[in-house]
Amino acid sequence: RLFSFSLSFWALIMASAYTANLASFLVAEDAPAYTSITLEEAYQTKTPVCAREGAAVHNELQRKYPGMHLVTAPSFVETYARLRNGDCFVMATRASDWSKFERDARVNTNDCGLKWIGRAESINGGGAATKIDIGE
């Protein structure tokens, strides 16, 4: 009787362990390794950085990091395409531009492979200038 109980308990433990290992094997995916580097690190290591040609971010990078290995394109869609093709390791852009293109199928295809990583490099204020007619 004791032997039978011990054998049953051992079988229960083995079945539970097998089920748990099988479940973790079926569920676990290879998590993509997102590495975040600062623009300073990219500058020092000559890491290619994508930026839209002529944009404020592009001009700021040229001013702040002269000689940085910048990969440019004339439009946002082409700049994101260069990032996806591996022409550059990271892309420097404004948070508002990323929000605009994050769900754009031309930029972030069905696999949603592009992610925002890192932090804001600088925060700049801005706004539109308007003229008010005060009725004089």
Image (cartoon, rainbow, N blue to C red):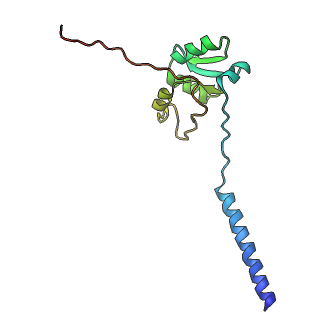
Task: Determine the image quadrant of residue 86.
Answer: top right
In the image, 134 versus 7, the foreground residue is 134
Q: At x 75% / y 80%, what residue is drawn?
A: 9
Above/below status of 136 relative to 97:
above
Q: At x 52% / y 23%, what residue is drawn?
A: 123
Above/below status of 106 relative to 52:
below
Task: Pinpoint residue 112: horizontal percent, then vertical percent.
Answer: 54, 39
Task: Pinpoint residue 29: horizontal percent, then vertical percent.
Answer: 66, 50
Q: At x 59% / y 24%, what residue is drawn?
A: 121
Task: Pinpoint residue 40: horizontal percent, then vertical percent.
Answer: 68, 21
Total residue callouts: 0
Task: Pinpoint residue 100: horizontal percent, then vertical percent.
Answer: 45, 30
Q: Quadrant of the C terminus?
A: top left
In the image, 15 versus 117, the foreground residue is 117
Task: Determine the image quadrant of residue 24.
Answer: bottom right
Task: Determine the image quadrant of residue 20.
Answer: bottom right
Q: Residue furthest left?
A: 136
Q: Residue furthest right?
A: 3
Q: At x 69% / y 58%, what residue is drawn?
A: 25
In the image, 105 versus 116, the foreground residue is 116
Q: Residue furthest top?
A: 136
Q: Is residue 36 left or right of residue 75?
A: right
